[in-house]
């Protein structure tokens, strides 16, 4: 059974650029959630995808968007990067769209200069 | 929305000591999870504990949902226990607490 994987592990971008982060869910899981963790804080919910549809969104602007593919892997896209977007981006997968146990990937560290 | 507060914010222990971490909720808790975030950022599931008590080795957790709190006990702490401990309410999305940063020294 493979766990949750994310790529890339680290990324440096400049303000105004666009970035795509990727997540492969754990085997058998059909739900992926994305979280942003700024330095020294707890993770904040961005959005969740369940069976390729967005299934809930946190307090993030529309320039944060996502996709889920038929194999349940997912992408997080951020347009017009701002300095405050520098953070650890975590994805978590779970068995269904409800309150099931979520399992996290190792994260992608994004630095915006 | 629900607010999750954790205490203490920071904890420094010597190897072998025991500790109790607390998580308080502003509203009813649905499904509570405890996580350990290691120094590399990986969040590791410790417990899924909506109510009652669970134990896993040196760790145990108790949730009293009616009183809106949960406790995580770490016994005989080891240096590998260092990191940040988060509790989170799981209502299809996770709402994380403020975290407790634990440092265990040999």
Image (cartoon, coloured by chain):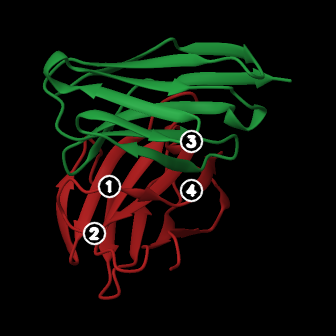
Chain colours: A red, B green
Provide the secondary structure element on which disc 4 rests.
loop
Quick one: label 4, few (<14), some, or many (20+) residues within 10 Å? many
In this rendering, would A57 be left or right of B33? left
Q: Quadrant of residue B75?
A: top right
Q: Residue at x 48, y 54 (%)?
A: A90
Provide the secondary structure element on which disc 1 rests.
loop
Question: Can residue B99 be seen in this snapshot?
Answer: no
Which label number is shown at residue B57? 3
Where is residue B34? Give x, y as percent: 42, 38
Q: Quadrant of residue A25?
A: bottom left
| Vertical relation: B9 (above or below) A57 | above
Q: Which residue is mark 4?
A: A107
Q: Are marks 4 and 1 in contact (CB under 8 Å)?
A: no
Question: Which sits in the foreground, A13 or A54?
Answer: A54
Q: Which residue is mark 1?
A: A101
Label 1 to label 2: alpha-carbon separation: 8 Å
Q: Nearer the viewer, mark 3 or mark 1?
A: 3
Quick one: label 3, few (<14), some, or many (20+) residues within 10 Å? few
Which label number is shown at residue A95? 2
Q: Quadrant of residue B49?
A: top left
């Amino acid at each position: 059974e493979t766990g949750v994987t994310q790529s890339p592990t680290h990324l440096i971008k400049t303000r105004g650029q666009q970035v795509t982060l990727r997540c492969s869910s754990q085997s058998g899981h059909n739900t992926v959630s994305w979280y942003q963790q700024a330095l020294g804080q707890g993770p904040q919910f961005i959005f969740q995808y369940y069976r390729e549809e967005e299934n809930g969104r946190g307090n993030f602007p529309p320039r944060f968007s996502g996709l889920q593919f038929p194999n349940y892997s997912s992408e997080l896209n951020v347009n017009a990067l701002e300095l405050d977007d520098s953070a650890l981006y975590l994805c978590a997968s779970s068995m269904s769209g409800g309150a099931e146990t979520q399992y996290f990937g190792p994260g992608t560290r994004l630095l915006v200069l | 929305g629900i607010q999750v507060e954790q205490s203490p914010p920071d904890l420094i222990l010597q190897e072998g000591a025991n500790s109790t971490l607390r998580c308080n909720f502003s509203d009813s808790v649905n499904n509570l999870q405890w996580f350990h975030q290691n120094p590399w950022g990986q969040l590791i599931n410790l417990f899924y504990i909506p109510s009652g008590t669970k134990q896993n080795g040196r760790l145990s957790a108790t949730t009293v949902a009616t009183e809106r709190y949960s406790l995580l006990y770490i016994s005989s702490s080891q240096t590998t226990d260092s990191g940040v401990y988060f509790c989170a309410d799981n209502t299809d999305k996770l709402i994380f607490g403020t975290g407790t940063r634990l440092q265990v020294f040999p």
